[in-house]
Each structure stands twice: as structure tokens, then as C-alpha cells.
Image (cartoon, grey):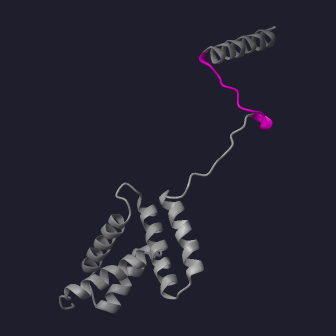
Amino acid sequence: MSHKPTAAEYRKRVNHVAAMLATGSARADIMQYGAEKWDLSIRAVDNLIARATVEIREAADSTKTDDEANARAIYMMVLREQIGRRDFRGAVATNDKLCRLLGLNAPERTEHTGADGAPLVPTTQADLAARFEELVREQAARLRKKDQ
């Protein structure tokens, strides 16, 4: 089919496939693009997809899921484009979202409350056991009443 690409051309292809993956392109779309643009076989495009996937995972933390890695890659691509267009306000907003995705932002405070906004009451094991016994007695009473 096609001739063997140079190292630079191969990098461009991998980067392009990574961008396609990051923006949600389906495997079939990437296959078609690879066949039409680079005259590649299915196996060759699969190899590019595999390499691009590895690079996306490496770019993100290896413990993150593929979806998290793809989301990070999208944010990075958008961030680069915004900086290239000198859209710094948009870049700051994108960076804030990326930081939130990566867990680099300050933790958000959440106030936990009990039923109807009442304060939470600490529950001990003895309280739970007493409540369980109470529920058992109530259920037994209902069953006795039902049998009568």
C-alpha cells in the first residue's frame, strides 16, 4: 500500500490519531481517514490507534481510566489552541476545568446535614443495636396483629 513513513511523519500521524480519539472519533472514522489520507491498511491504522491510545494514557496518569485520559487530552488540545489564538481568558477557564478534572483545585466545602436540614447526630453501635431491636419488635407486633 503505502511507503514506510519517516519518523517525523509517523509522529504526525500518531498525534493526529490521538487528536481524533480525544475528540471522540469512532474507530471506523479513523480507519477511513487513515485509508484515504495516508493509504494505510486496517492493520496499520490499528497500530496507529494503539500507539495513540498508549500516548494518551501516558499523558494522563496511568491509574486513570480511558475516559479521564481522553478528557484530559481534549482539554490540553483546547488549551493549546486558545493560547495560540491569544485567547487567554478562555485559556484560564479551560485550565480551571482541567485542574478540577485532575483534582488539583482546592477541595470544595460541603456541609452535610441530617433529615430536613437538621444537624447530623453521631450514631454509636449501641444506638444502632437498640434501633434494630425496636424495628424487630414493631415488625413482630405487626405480624401478630395480622395473624389475629
Q: Is residue 133 left or right of residue 141?
A: left
Q: Write the residue at 56% across / 74% down.
A: 92
Tell which of 109 and 69 is nearer to you: 109
Extent of the magenta region: 115-125
Q: 8 or 33, which lies in front?
A: 8
For image coordinates 47% across by 60% down, the residue present is 102
Q: How many marks?
A: 0
Quarter of image, res 76: bottom left
The N terminus - image quarter: bottom left
Please identify the dominant SS of the magenta region.
Answer: loop
Q: Position of residue 96 (x, y in %)?
A: 55, 67
Which quadrant: the C terminus?
Answer: top right
Asked if residue 117 is among those painted magenta in the image, a careful observer would answer yes
The magenta stretch spans residue 116: yes
- Quadrant assignment, res 123: top right
Residue 39: image location, x then y, percent: 28, 90
Residue at point 50%, 56% (across, down):
103
Residue 31 percent location from the top left of the image: 35, 81
Q: Is residue 143 left or right of residue 108?
A: right
Q: Is residue 121 above or below residue 133?
A: below
* 147 sits left or right of 49 in the view: right
- Taking 9 as reference, is 61 above or below it? above
Q: Nearer the viewer, residue 18 or 93?
A: 93
Horizontally, is 44 left or right of 87 in the view?
Answer: left
| Location of residue 51 in the rendering, given as x and y in whole percent from the top left corner | 28, 72
